[in-house]
Image (cartoon, helix red, strand yellow):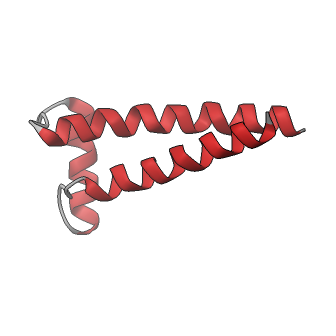
Amino acid sequence: METLAITLLVIDTIALIVLVLLQSGKSAGLSGAISGGAEQLFGKQKARGIDAVLHKATIVAGVLFFVLAFSTAYVIG
């Protein structure tokens, strides 16, 4: 059971890294990061096409990462 949990966690970690690296950057620099966060928070700019799919897949992989991390710690500990 421990081996299965660790293997799933490693696979999800690699998938999460790949999904983040495949996404296109919104803006450059610190000011771009602040304005990009505000636009995302207030919904002024909606992602279209493949960016939307990558964004949703990243959220799913991130949630799955935390669930697997906690469950792996529970199984091992």
Where residue 8 sits: x, y (%)? 61, 40
In this rendering, the answer to whether 5 lies above or below 16 is above
Q: Nearer the viewer, residue 65 or 3?
A: 3
Pick whichever, 72 or 33, lies toward us. 72
Which of the image's four quarters has the N terminus? top right
Give x and y (percent) for residue 44. 12, 34
Residue at (34%, 49%) from the top-left corner? 19
The C terminus is located in which quarter? top right
| Left or right, residue 48 beside residue 1 | left
Number of numbered discs: 0
Furthest residue to the right? 77
**Residue beneath the point at 28% across and 45% down:** 37
Q: Position of residue 14 (x, y in %)?
A: 48, 53
The front one of 77 and 29 is 77
Q: Residue furthest bottom?
A: 29
In the image, residue 11 lies at what x, y percent? 54, 47
In which quarter of the view is residue 34 placed?
Answer: bottom left
41 vs 27, left or right, is right
Q: Is residue 54 left or right of residue 26?
A: right
Q: Quadrant of residue 28?
A: bottom left
Describe residue 71's horizontal placement relative to residue 67 as left or right. Answer: right
Please report the residue visible at 23 percent of the width from the left and 62 percent of the height from the top. Answer: 31
